[in-house]
């Protein structure tokens, strides 16, 4: 029996959740059998232990060694086989969200077209034809497809399966649809805030808007990461973890994302109001935990952002006539646009949004927040609230 190296993903299923792993064992003629092995109940072991047992199972069943491919045969290897068995093996350090995003792009756009072709026979024209065929998709999607192909073919070049990367000099078709990147006006922001009468919902939206946070950051905040000095009025969040698919993760999107984020006075007032009403403000408790009313997660676990957006925010935005889907990407774009329009510099805006950029020094958690960012946050709030007479009053 011929064995090939693979690194299957740990999975969970069942009414009484249990860990299991699926993988393939190849025969000498190239055919294979699928195997599924149950590892144990989720209630009886942690994920680390389950992963350890999974590795032992794979080592036992497949010998953990990749089959050596002769140089003369490498160019004839199917692209899909190289991707699944040679490329993904080298990406053990990927985060779960990145792996899912990469896999989705490859499985949806690339492998159906190129998966069965010999990797050495795929040329630049074939790759460009694939990109040209993505009519109706946004420039962003087409760029993602191209970037993924460049990376996979780049690894094939490193492993000496090909002698050039056919994706590097391809271009984004002129006809690719430019992505819609709408922003909210000051009046729309203020109208939404006024409609959010629930303390929790108002705090979520104001933090996402005025602190320019990503969705995963807002819903991954524990109370211990909120710092407020009552004497000086200084308030900030420490961003060093996120929430993704109902679970906490001790990481951030990138090094620049790991930072102190200043909290403006009106957002602070909304947050303090929620703190007074929140049933659990212990240090490790999430600021915005799930109540598990729909049974999708444990009580106290991270909320599912899509559910909150659909039930709490989208109906208000639709009622107000906002002509696009309001989410935290839109509020981050709004923050970036309005703080600069109000006079803040581009580096200040980049620092506020914590984008990794060669022109901006990453704001790590151990460093203080630049004064220019604090000023920008409060100016942003002032500009929005100047559009009317909101119920929230600024803390002096």
Image (cartoon, rainbow, N blue to C red):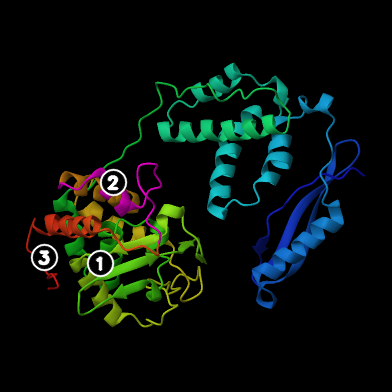
Q: Position of residue 82 (x, y in %)?
A: 72, 35
Q: Residue at x 31, y 48 (%)?
A: 350
Which residue is tagged 3? 390
Q: Find the distance from the CA under tag 2 to the CA under tag 3.
A: 30 Å
Q: Provide the major secondary structure of the magenta segment.
A: loop
Image side of residue 179 versus residue 339, left or right? right
Q: Is residue 42 magenta?
A: no
Which residue is tagged 2? 347
Q: Is residue 346 magenta?
A: yes
Which residue is tagged 1? 202
Q: Find the distance from the CA under tag 3 to the CA under tag 1.
A: 13 Å
Q: Residue at x 34, y 49 (%)?
A: 329
Q: Position of residue 100 (x, y in %)?
A: 56, 49
Q: N-terminal of the two: label 2 or label 3?
A: 2
Q: N-terminal of the two: label 3 or label 1?
A: 1
Q: Residue at x 15, y 48 (%)?
A: 342
The crowd level at tag 3 (other Cα within 10 Å; few <14, some 14-19, many 20+) is few
Image side of residue 314 versus residue 9, left or right? left
Q: Position of residue 32 (x, y in %)?
A: 84, 43
Is the C-beta separation of discs 2 and 3 under 8 Å?
no
Image quadrant for the N terminus?
Answer: top right
Q: Quadrant of residue 211?
A: bottom left
Which is in the foreground here, disc 2 or disc 3?
2
Q: Which residues are magenta?
A: 342-364
In terms of secondary structure, where does tag 3 sit? loop
Image side of residue 164 versus residue 252, left or right? right
Image quadrant for the C terminus?
Answer: bottom left
Q: N-terminal of the two: label 2 or label 1?
A: 1
Q: Find the distance from the CA under tag 2 to the CA under tag 1.
A: 29 Å
């Amino acid at each position: 029996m011929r064995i090939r190296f693979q690194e299957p993903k740990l999975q969970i299923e069942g009414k009484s959740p249990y860990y299991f792993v699926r993988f393939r064992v190849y025969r000498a003629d190239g055919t294979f059998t699928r195997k599924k092995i149950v590892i144990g109940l989720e209630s009886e072991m942690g994920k680390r232990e389950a992963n350890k047992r999974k590795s032992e199972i794979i080592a036992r069943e497949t010998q953990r060694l990749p089959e050596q491919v002769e140089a003369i045969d490498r160019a004839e290897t199917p692209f899909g086989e190289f991707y699944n068995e040679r490329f993904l093996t080298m990406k053990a350090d990927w985060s779960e969200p990145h792996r899912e995003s990469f896999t989705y792009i490859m499985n949806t756009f690339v492998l159906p077209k190129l998966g069965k072709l010999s990797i050495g026979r795929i040329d630049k024209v074939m790759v460009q034809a694939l990109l040209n065929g993505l009519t109706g998709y946004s420039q962003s999607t087409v760029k993602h497809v191209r970037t993924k192909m460049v990376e996979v073919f780049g690894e094939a070049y490193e492993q000496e399966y090909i002698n050039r990367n056919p994706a590097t000099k391809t271009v984004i078709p002129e006809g690719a649809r430019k992505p819609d990147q709408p922003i909210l006006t000051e009046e729309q922001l203020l109208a939404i805030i006024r409609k959010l009468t629930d303390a929790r919902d108002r705090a979520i939206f104001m933090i996402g808007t005025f602190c320019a946070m990503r969705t995963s950051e807002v819903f991954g905040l524990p109370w211990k990461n909120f710092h407020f000095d009552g004497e000086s009025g200084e308030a900030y969040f420490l961003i060093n973890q996120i929430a993704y698919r109902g679970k906490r993760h001790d990481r951030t999107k990138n090094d620049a994302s790991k930072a102190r984020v200043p909290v403006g006075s009106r957002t602070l007032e909304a947050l303090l109001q929620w703190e007074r009403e929140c049933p659990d403000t212990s240090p490790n408790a999430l600021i915005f935990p799930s109540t598990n009313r729909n049974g999708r997660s444990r009580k106290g676990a991270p909320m599912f952002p899509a559910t909150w957006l659909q039930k709490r925010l989208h109906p208000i935005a639709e009622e107000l006539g906002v002509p696009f889907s309001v989410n935290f990407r839109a509020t981050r774009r709004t923050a970036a646009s309005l703080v600069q329009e109000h006079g803040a510099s581009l580096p200040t805006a980049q620092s506020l949004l914590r984008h990794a950029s060669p022109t901006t020094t990453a704001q790590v958690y151990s460093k203080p927040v630049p004064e220019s960012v604090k000023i920008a946050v409060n100016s942003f709030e002032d500009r929005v609230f100047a559009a009317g007479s909101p119920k929230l009053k600024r803390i002096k």
